[in-house]
Image: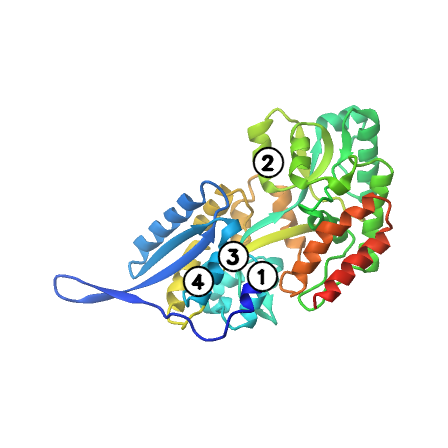
Amino acid sequence: MAASALLLTSCGFGGGTSTSTGGASGSAAAVTTLDMMVPSYSDGTKALWEKVIKDFEAANTDVKVNLEIQSWENIEGVLKTKIQGNKAPDIYNGGAFAEFAAEGLLAPATDVASEATVADFQPSFADNEKVDGTQYGLPLIASARALFYNKTLMKEAGVADVPKTWDELYAAAKAVGEKTKSDGYGMPLGNEEAQGESMIWFAGNGGNFGSGTAIEVNTPVNLEAAEFMQKMIKDGATQKDPGATQRTPMLNTFIQGKLGFAYGLPQTIGQIKKENPALEYGVAPVATKSGTPATLGVADRLMSFKNDGSKAASVKKFMDYFFSADVYTNWVSTEGFLPTTKSGSEKLAGDETLKPFLDMLPSAVFYPTTNPAWNATDGAFKSLMGQIATGKSAADVLKEIQAKADAAK
């Protein structure tokens, strides 16, 4: 998407089209057609959106929504083609958006959603949708990480309390590794998601990867976190060869009951229920250096290409309808994600399985996706961070990653 944005110009694209339908008296009512393109999160994504659209159109007869579903592998390429053909979607569900905003192609959130809808988003999520102080994205789904722990292995290892701090996690993981036939803590530093594992630890020490204006990987707080990660590895508190471990198979190992602790997602709960319902496990907040709440937050968003601006009012109707508490929480919970709105969190607060994730949302730390150098930084983490498992100093690894980020400015 970032590359495709370089090909864009700031000219307006194909305008809003309306059709008229006449009744018996000859009167006509204008109908605005919105083109909506979204990715598929699951086998049920299409049906979920179709239900939302059907109910929305029934309540708003002056608006029609044309839905297009694409795979995550294809959607960015399809978007590029549409933009080049002056057919940008009116509503788009995607990832990075900073370049589109810089080209003047996106409508500000306040133009396509009511003041009440915009104000309902969790502040940490809303801030992540801003470029130069203006919010463009409407946070659609949230995913936070929490600590999954195996109760059976903890009991077998003599660990009484769920770890809340790094030192407690270190001790608990060591005990599981030494006193059971399973590994203690799963640390996935392979190229699937080394950046995610790193951010969890960095955030646990008050760190992050920087902001939309500056990538800051090589900082004292991040280095301290990386050195503790390396201590976990060297002292045998993790599985063997974390540098070659991917997140998905690591979580599968936890689900099979062969791992003491791992950071998982809301969807992990559903996987356990399906694949190993007998597993005795629990979910708790991320263990941090001091015990202060912090976690990695990931969000996708809805955004609107403003085209000639004629459809803004209709887009606003749709956004306000979709983000209403009942409609939105049904959609987001069915897909297995967390709500990004305050009203959505309140509505789902009674779900005990989601409570640790919901409680951490206000303290979520995000990737600096609005920074043009983020893609290079992301790639550097995936290819280089695993070196801390091979004996290379954490300081040198962070310097390498920082150099890759700096070169991408």
Residue 169 spot, x, y in % from top left: 79, 39
What's the residue at 60%, 60% (across, down)?
Answer: 123
Neighbor class of circle 3 (other Cα within 10 Å; few <14, some 14-19, many 20+) is some
Residue 234 spot, x, y in % from top left: 86, 40
Disc on the earlier residue, 1 or 3: 3
Disc 1 + disc 3, Cβ < 8 Å: no
Which one is in front, 129 or 325?
Answer: 129
Neighbor class of circle 2 (other Cα within 10 Å; few <14, some 14-19, many 20+) is some
Cα distance in 3D space between marks 4 and 2: 37 Å
Q: Secondary structure at mark 3?
A: helix
Cα distance in 3D space between marks 1 and 4: 27 Å
On residue 82, which mark appears? Answer: 4
Which one is in front, 9 or 238?
Answer: 9
Cα distance in 3D space between marks 1 and 2: 26 Å
Disc 1 + disc 4, Cβ < 8 Å: no
Q: From the viewer's perspective, tell me whether residue 63 is left or right of residue 170.
A: left
Cα distance in 3D space between marks 1 and 3: 23 Å
Name the kind of residue labelled 3 in the image: Glu
